[in-house]
Image (tube, rainbow, N blue to C red):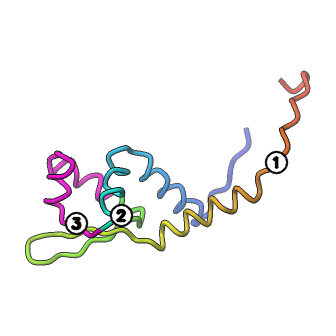
Amino acid sequence: MSTILQTDSSATTIAKFKALSDPLRLAVVELLRSQEMCVCDLCDRMDIAQSKLSFHLKTLREAGLISARQEGRWIYYRLNPAEFGELEDYLTTLRQLTPQSPARPCSPDRL
């Protein structure tokens, strides 16, 4: 079995995609697309308890996809567009490297 080497860059990319793989976190991203929102508004819009949402917000923050600022007793969240740009660049590179011809079938002796 071969080992795939993981660089810091690939670990960061993996963390971002993992953060986006959860439907609830993706819903948070969709809500933050148009504006910064406080956690209370996110809870109301998503009809979810703050304790449950906090875990998902932490995951998105650790992946660098959102940032937070505190104003008084409220915490406001917003997207980090540069991080999404990095994911877009990654996907663009993959698209350019993907062969356009169909793959050859494996030979029977390799199965």
Please tell me whether the stretch drawn in magenta is mainly helix, strand or loop: helix
Q: Earlier in the sequence, mark 2 or mark 1?
A: 2
94 relative position to 81: left or right: right
| Frontmost residue, 32 versus 111 | 32
Residue 82: x percent and y percent? Answer: 48, 74
Q: Is residue 95 left or right of residue 68?
A: right
- Picture layout, residue 58 above or below residue 21: below
The residue carrying mark 3 is 37
* Callout 1: SS: loop
Q: Is residue 108 above or below residue 86?
A: above
**On the rendered image, what quadrant is the C terminus found in?**
top right
- Asked where in the image residue 30 lies, by quadrant, the reply is bottom left
Marks 2 and 3 in Cβ contact (< 8 Å): no
Q: Does dot 2 land on a helix, a strand or a loop?
A: loop
Q: Residue at 88% of width from left, 35% of height from top?
A: 104
Circle 2 residue: 33
Label 1 crowd (10 A; few <14 / some 14-19 / many >=20): few
- Residue tagged 1: 100
Residue 7: quadrant of the picture = bottom right
Disc 3 packing (10 Å; few <14; some 14–19; many ≥20) = some
Region in magenta: 35-59
The residue at the point 27 percent across, 71 percent down is 68
Task: Report the amino acid beneath label 2.
Answer: Arg
Relative horizontal placement of residue 44, taking residue 62 as reference (left or right) = left
Q: Amino acid at mark 3?
A: Met
Q: Position of residue 5 (x, y in %)?
A: 67, 55
Secondary element type, mark 3: strand
The label number, if any, that marks residue 36 in the structure image: none
Give percent across and percent down for residue 69: 23, 75
Horizontal and vertical percent position of residue 44: 14, 52
Of callouts 1 and 3, which one flags the residue occurring earlier in the amino acid sequence? 3
